[in-house]
Amino acid sequence: MTPLYKFQLSTIFEGWKCECILTADSEERAKQMYYQKFSEGQFEMPYQEFVKFIQCKYLEHVDITQVFSKEKLFQKMCEQRKIPFAYMGMRVEVTGRMGTIVGSWKKNLYVVFDGNPDKFNCNPWWEIAYFDEDGNVVRDYRKGAYTLGVM
């Protein structure tokens, strides 16, 4: 199943923003859907010209579980790296950026950071804090200035 994302689209014109939130599997598909909304009898502009006048901003995953890795491999990595408390869907902060654990790659975590649809490879012990469902810190391996709220 292809993961779905929410995008906020609008025109670049100040007086005519026409904001819209769409669900699509890619930024390009969201732009095409936005174009279809406009091209239904309202104006006749080629798609290649239209995309020059719109902004597309990623908002979030529709369902974060769509990008989860295989559970068995994730649990094996957690045992080997001595982080048995970690689970897919757990909130973490890595170098000051909040994200969600979505799986593992070899001996590291895959994390999707807030505001970014991509998965990032993160060391489970380097500059990371793990949070439970209530937002309480479970483990904290941070050492940088962002731990003090200085940034």
Image: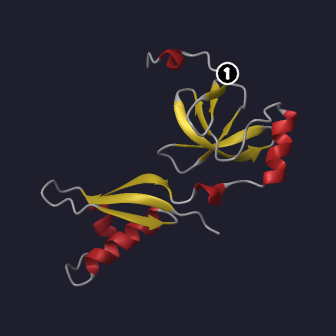
Identify whether 76 is placed above or below 46. Answer: above
**Where residue 75 appears, x then y in whole percent?**
82, 45
**Where residue 114 appears, x then y in whole percent?**
50, 43
Q: Nearer the viewer, residue 28 or 62?
A: 62
Q: Is residue 130 left or right of residue 38?
A: right
Identify whether 102 is placed above or below 134. Answer: below
Residue positioned most to the front: 134
Q: Is residue 42 left or right of residue 51?
A: left
Residue at the image point whose x is 23% and y is 55% from the top: 12
Q: Is residue 76 left or right of residue 93?
A: right
Residue at the image point whose x is 32% and y is 64% from the top: 51
Q: Callout 1: helix, strand or loop?
A: loop
Which image quarter is the C terminus in? top left
Residue at the image point whose x is 68% and y is 54% from the top: 68
- Its colouring scheme is secondary structure
The image quadrant that residue 44 belongs to is: bottom left
The image quadrant that residue 45 belongs to is: bottom left
Q: Nearer the viewer, residue 143 or 89?
A: 89
Which image quarter is the N terminus in? bottom right
Q: Is residue 101 left or right of residue 12?
A: right
Q: Nearer the viewer, residue 27 or 102?
A: 102
Q: Nearer the viewer, residue 109 or 40?
A: 109
Check disc 1 and report the residue beneath it: 141
**Where residue 69 appears, x then y in whole percent?**
73, 53
**Where residue 109 appears, x then y in whole percent?**
71, 40
The amino acid type, in three-letter code, at marker 1 is Tyr
Residue at the image point whose x is 60% and y is 35% from the top: 92
Residue positioned most to the bottom: 41
Could you classify mark 1 by the number of other residues whose Cα lies within 10 Å: few (under 14), some (14-19), or many (20 or more)?
some
